[in-house]
Amino acid sequence: MELKILGSSSHGNGYILEADNEALIIEAGVKLLEAKKAINFNLSKVVGCLVSHQHNDHAGNALEYASAGVIVLALPEVIIAKNIERNYKTIEFGKGYKMGNFKILPFELMHDVPCAGFLIEHPQSGKVLFITDTYACKYRFTGLSHILIEANYADDILTDNILEGRLPQVMRKRLLTSHMEIESTKEFLRSSDLKQVRNIVLLHLSDGNSNEKRFVDECKAVTGKKVVAANAGMVIQFGALPL
Protein backbone atom coordinates (compact mmCIF):
# COMPACT_ATOMS: atom_id res chain seq x y z
CA MET A 1 0.00 0.00 0.00
CA GLU A 2 1.14 3.52 -0.79
CA LEU A 3 -0.19 6.84 0.44
CA LYS A 4 -0.02 9.42 -2.33
CA ILE A 5 -0.51 13.04 -1.34
CA LEU A 6 -2.19 15.29 -3.90
CA GLY A 7 -2.50 18.30 -1.61
CA SER A 8 -2.82 19.10 2.08
CA SER A 9 -3.62 22.77 2.59
CA SER A 10 -6.36 25.36 2.34
CA HIS A 11 -5.66 25.40 -1.41
CA GLY A 12 -6.88 21.82 -1.78
CA ASN A 13 -6.76 18.48 0.00
CA GLY A 14 -6.48 15.06 -1.59
CA TYR A 15 -4.92 11.73 -0.69
CA ILE A 16 -4.87 8.29 -2.31
CA LEU A 17 -4.45 4.94 -0.60
CA GLU A 18 -3.25 2.75 -3.46
CA ALA A 19 -3.10 -1.02 -3.10
CA ASP A 20 -1.97 -3.48 -5.76
CA ASN A 21 -5.28 -3.67 -7.60
CA GLU A 22 -7.46 -0.94 -6.10
CA ALA A 23 -7.30 2.58 -4.73
CA LEU A 24 -9.31 4.76 -2.37
CA ILE A 25 -9.28 8.54 -2.71
CA ILE A 26 -9.70 10.62 0.45
CA GLU A 27 -11.02 14.16 -0.10
CA ALA A 28 -11.98 15.81 -3.37
CA GLY A 29 -10.26 19.15 -2.94
CA VAL A 30 -8.00 18.76 -5.98
CA LYS A 31 -9.04 18.31 -9.58
CA LEU A 32 -9.69 14.80 -10.83
CA LEU A 33 -6.86 15.15 -13.35
CA GLU A 34 -4.32 15.27 -10.51
CA ALA A 35 -5.75 12.08 -9.00
CA LYS A 36 -5.65 10.39 -12.40
CA LYS A 37 -2.00 11.33 -12.87
CA ALA A 38 -1.13 9.79 -9.50
CA ILE A 39 -2.61 6.42 -10.49
CA ASN A 40 -1.33 6.43 -14.09
CA PHE A 41 -4.79 7.33 -15.39
CA ASN A 42 -6.19 3.94 -14.32
CA LEU A 43 -9.43 5.32 -12.90
CA SER A 44 -11.00 1.86 -13.02
CA LYS A 45 -9.00 0.83 -9.94
CA VAL A 46 -10.62 3.57 -7.81
CA VAL A 47 -13.27 2.03 -5.57
CA GLY A 48 -14.47 5.36 -4.19
CA CYS A 49 -13.73 8.77 -2.72
CA LEU A 50 -14.28 9.69 0.93
CA VAL A 51 -15.12 13.33 1.65
CA SER A 52 -14.93 14.67 5.20
CA HIS A 53 -17.08 17.80 4.83
CA GLN A 54 -18.49 20.36 2.41
CA HIS A 55 -15.82 23.07 2.34
CA ASN A 56 -14.30 23.53 -1.09
CA ASP A 57 -10.73 22.68 -0.14
CA HIS A 58 -12.04 19.20 0.69
CA ALA A 59 -15.13 18.80 -1.51
CA GLY A 60 -14.82 21.39 -4.27
CA ASN A 61 -14.33 18.75 -6.98
CA ALA A 62 -16.66 16.08 -5.60
CA LEU A 63 -19.19 16.59 -8.38
CA GLU A 64 -16.45 16.15 -10.99
CA TYR A 65 -15.40 12.87 -9.34
CA ALA A 66 -18.98 11.58 -9.23
CA SER A 67 -19.62 12.63 -12.82
CA ALA A 68 -16.61 10.54 -13.87
CA GLY A 69 -18.09 7.47 -12.18
CA VAL A 70 -16.24 7.61 -8.86
CA ILE A 71 -18.52 6.73 -5.94
CA VAL A 72 -18.44 9.59 -3.43
CA LEU A 73 -18.93 8.54 0.19
CA ALA A 74 -19.90 11.57 2.28
CA LEU A 75 -22.31 13.12 4.75
CA PRO A 76 -25.71 14.20 3.34
CA GLU A 77 -24.68 17.85 3.75
CA VAL A 78 -21.84 17.32 1.26
CA ILE A 79 -24.03 15.59 -1.31
CA ILE A 80 -26.62 18.39 -1.13
CA ALA A 81 -24.12 21.27 -1.09
CA LYS A 82 -22.25 19.94 -4.14
CA ASN A 83 -25.39 19.00 -6.10
CA ILE A 84 -24.34 15.38 -6.52
CA GLU A 85 -27.21 13.40 -8.03
CA ARG A 86 -25.56 10.07 -8.87
CA ASN A 87 -22.60 7.88 -7.91
CA TYR A 88 -22.75 8.62 -4.19
CA LYS A 89 -23.42 6.98 -0.85
CA THR A 90 -24.45 9.01 2.17
CA ILE A 91 -22.83 8.06 5.45
CA GLU A 92 -23.86 7.91 9.08
CA PHE A 93 -21.47 8.25 11.99
CA GLY A 94 -20.67 4.89 13.57
CA LYS A 95 -21.94 2.81 10.65
CA GLY A 96 -19.50 0.64 8.70
CA TYR A 97 -19.04 0.72 4.92
CA LYS A 98 -17.03 -1.29 2.42
CA MET A 99 -15.56 -0.10 -0.87
CA GLY A 100 -13.59 -2.85 -2.56
CA ASN A 101 -11.46 -4.35 0.19
CA PHE A 102 -11.41 -1.10 2.16
CA LYS A 103 -13.50 -1.14 5.34
CA ILE A 104 -14.51 2.34 6.46
CA LEU A 105 -15.94 3.59 9.75
CA PRO A 106 -16.92 7.29 9.79
CA PHE A 107 -16.97 9.12 13.12
CA GLU A 108 -17.97 12.62 14.16
CA LEU A 109 -15.44 15.45 14.32
CA MET A 110 -15.78 19.02 15.62
CA HIS A 111 -15.68 21.62 12.86
CA ASP A 112 -17.87 24.61 11.98
CA VAL A 113 -19.91 22.39 9.63
CA PRO A 114 -20.71 18.67 9.98
CA CYS A 115 -17.45 16.78 9.50
CA ALA A 116 -16.38 13.13 9.48
CA GLY A 117 -13.16 11.39 10.36
CA PHE A 118 -12.50 7.92 9.01
CA LEU A 119 -11.06 4.69 10.34
CA ILE A 120 -9.99 2.77 7.24
CA GLU A 121 -8.84 -0.84 7.19
CA HIS A 122 -7.33 -2.84 4.33
CA PRO A 123 -5.31 -6.09 4.29
CA GLN A 124 -2.34 -4.28 2.75
CA SER A 125 -2.28 -1.33 5.17
CA GLY A 126 -3.84 -2.39 8.43
CA LYS A 127 -5.84 0.30 10.22
CA VAL A 128 -5.43 3.87 8.94
CA LEU A 129 -6.86 6.77 10.95
CA PHE A 130 -7.79 9.98 9.13
CA ILE A 131 -8.60 13.14 11.13
CA THR A 132 -8.74 16.65 9.71
CA ASP A 133 -10.57 19.97 10.19
CA THR A 134 -11.51 19.52 13.82
CA TYR A 135 -10.47 21.24 17.03
CA ALA A 136 -10.52 17.94 18.94
CA CYS A 137 -11.38 14.26 18.66
CA LYS A 138 -13.33 12.61 21.46
CA TYR A 139 -12.55 9.07 20.28
CA ARG A 140 -9.47 6.89 20.67
CA PHE A 141 -8.58 3.86 18.57
CA THR A 142 -6.53 0.70 19.07
CA GLY A 143 -4.41 -1.39 16.74
CA LEU A 144 -3.58 1.46 14.36
CA SER A 145 -0.88 1.08 11.71
CA HIS A 146 -0.91 4.64 10.36
CA ILE A 147 -2.28 7.99 11.54
CA LEU A 148 -3.11 10.98 9.35
CA ILE A 149 -3.97 13.90 11.63
CA GLU A 150 -4.36 17.64 11.32
CA ALA A 151 -1.75 19.94 12.87
CA ASN A 152 -3.05 23.23 11.56
CA TYR A 153 -1.55 25.97 13.71
CA ALA A 154 0.39 26.91 16.83
CA ASP A 155 -1.26 29.32 19.22
CA ASP A 156 1.95 31.29 19.81
CA ILE A 157 2.51 31.82 16.07
CA LEU A 158 -1.14 32.81 15.63
CA THR A 159 -0.86 35.27 18.54
CA ASP A 160 2.23 36.90 17.04
CA ASN A 161 0.50 37.25 13.68
CA ILE A 162 -2.51 38.92 15.31
CA LEU A 163 -0.41 41.25 17.48
CA GLU A 164 1.68 42.31 14.49
CA GLY A 165 -1.41 43.02 12.40
CA ARG A 166 -0.97 40.24 9.87
CA LEU A 167 -4.26 38.61 10.90
CA PRO A 168 -7.50 39.96 12.40
CA GLN A 169 -8.41 39.04 15.98
CA VAL A 170 -11.52 37.21 14.73
CA MET A 171 -9.22 34.59 13.20
CA ARG A 172 -8.44 33.20 16.66
CA LYS A 173 -12.10 32.52 17.43
CA ARG A 174 -12.58 30.80 14.09
CA LEU A 175 -9.55 28.53 14.47
CA LEU A 176 -10.39 27.63 18.07
CA THR A 177 -13.68 26.11 16.90
CA SER A 178 -12.63 24.56 13.61
CA HIS A 179 -9.01 23.39 13.38
CA MET A 180 -6.53 21.41 15.45
CA GLU A 181 -3.80 23.32 17.27
CA ILE A 182 -0.46 21.54 17.58
CA GLU A 183 -0.82 20.98 21.34
CA SER A 184 -4.17 19.26 20.72
CA THR A 185 -2.54 17.10 18.04
CA LYS A 186 0.21 16.09 20.45
CA GLU A 187 -2.27 15.36 23.24
CA PHE A 188 -4.28 13.11 20.93
CA LEU A 189 -1.14 11.23 19.95
CA ARG A 190 0.06 10.94 23.55
CA SER A 191 -3.25 9.40 24.61
CA SER A 192 -3.50 6.99 21.67
CA ASP A 193 -2.41 3.38 21.26
CA LEU A 194 0.73 3.75 19.14
CA LYS A 195 2.29 0.32 19.65
CA GLN A 196 1.80 -0.79 16.03
CA VAL A 197 1.93 2.63 14.37
CA ARG A 198 4.43 2.91 11.51
CA ASN A 199 3.66 6.38 10.19
CA ILE A 200 2.22 9.61 11.56
CA VAL A 201 1.41 12.11 8.82
CA LEU A 202 0.59 15.69 9.82
CA LEU A 203 -2.10 17.27 7.65
CA HIS A 204 -3.36 20.69 6.64
CA LEU A 205 -0.60 22.86 8.12
CA SER A 206 -1.57 26.54 7.91
CA ASP A 207 0.45 28.64 5.46
CA GLY A 208 1.17 31.34 8.03
CA ASN A 209 0.37 29.92 11.45
CA SER A 210 2.50 26.77 11.49
CA ASN A 211 6.13 25.68 11.43
CA GLU A 212 6.63 22.37 9.66
CA LYS A 213 9.99 21.42 11.18
CA ARG A 214 8.88 22.34 14.70
CA PHE A 215 5.61 20.43 14.40
CA VAL A 216 7.33 17.31 13.06
CA ASP A 217 10.06 17.45 15.71
CA GLU A 218 7.59 17.95 18.56
CA CYS A 219 5.37 15.07 17.43
CA LYS A 220 8.42 12.82 17.06
CA ALA A 221 9.44 13.73 20.60
CA VAL A 222 6.10 12.77 22.14
CA THR A 223 5.57 9.59 20.10
CA GLY A 224 8.99 8.16 19.22
CA LYS A 225 7.52 7.35 15.80
CA LYS A 226 8.25 8.29 12.20
CA VAL A 227 6.51 11.63 11.59
CA VAL A 228 6.25 13.62 8.36
CA ALA A 229 4.24 16.64 7.26
CA ALA A 230 2.10 16.05 4.19
CA ASN A 231 3.17 17.88 1.05
CA ALA A 232 1.85 17.51 -2.49
CA GLY A 233 3.72 14.89 -4.47
CA MET A 234 4.84 12.79 -1.51
CA VAL A 235 4.53 8.99 -1.65
CA ILE A 236 4.72 7.08 1.64
CA GLN A 237 4.85 3.31 2.07
CA PHE A 238 1.83 2.25 4.12
CA GLY A 239 2.41 -1.44 4.83
CA ALA A 240 0.31 -3.42 7.30
CA LEU A 241 3.00 -4.89 9.54
CA PRO A 242 4.77 -2.85 12.22
CA LEU A 243 8.49 -2.28 11.91
Image: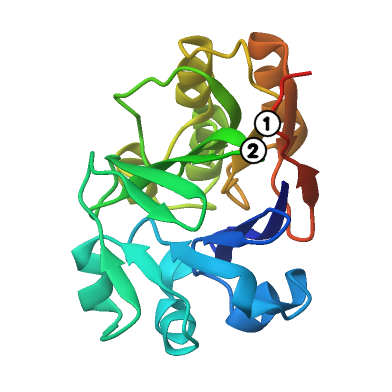
Where is residue 167? Give x, y as percent: 48, 52
Label ID, residue 125: 2
| Residue closer to the observer: 205 or 37 | 37
Q: Name the residue under label 1.
A: 240
> From the viewer's perspective, is 160 left or right of 227?
left
Residue at the location (69% across, 56% down)? 5
Determine the image quadrant of residue 212: top right
Residue at the location (60% across, 38% down)? 123
Residue at the location (43% across, 89% down)? 67
| Residue closer to the observer: 65 or 219 | 65
Is 171 above or below relative to 100?
Answer: above
Where is residue 42? Give x, y as percent: 70, 78
Is 100 above or below relative to 237?
Answer: below
> From the viewer's perspective, is 41 left or right of 17?
right
Q: Which quadrant holds the C terminus?
A: top right
Residue at the location (77% across, 32% down)? 213
| Residue closer to the observer: 21 or 86 | 21
Query: Rounded to the nearest whole Å, what is the CA distance between mark 2 and mark 1?
Result: 4 Å
Where is residue 204? Give x, y as percent: 56, 49
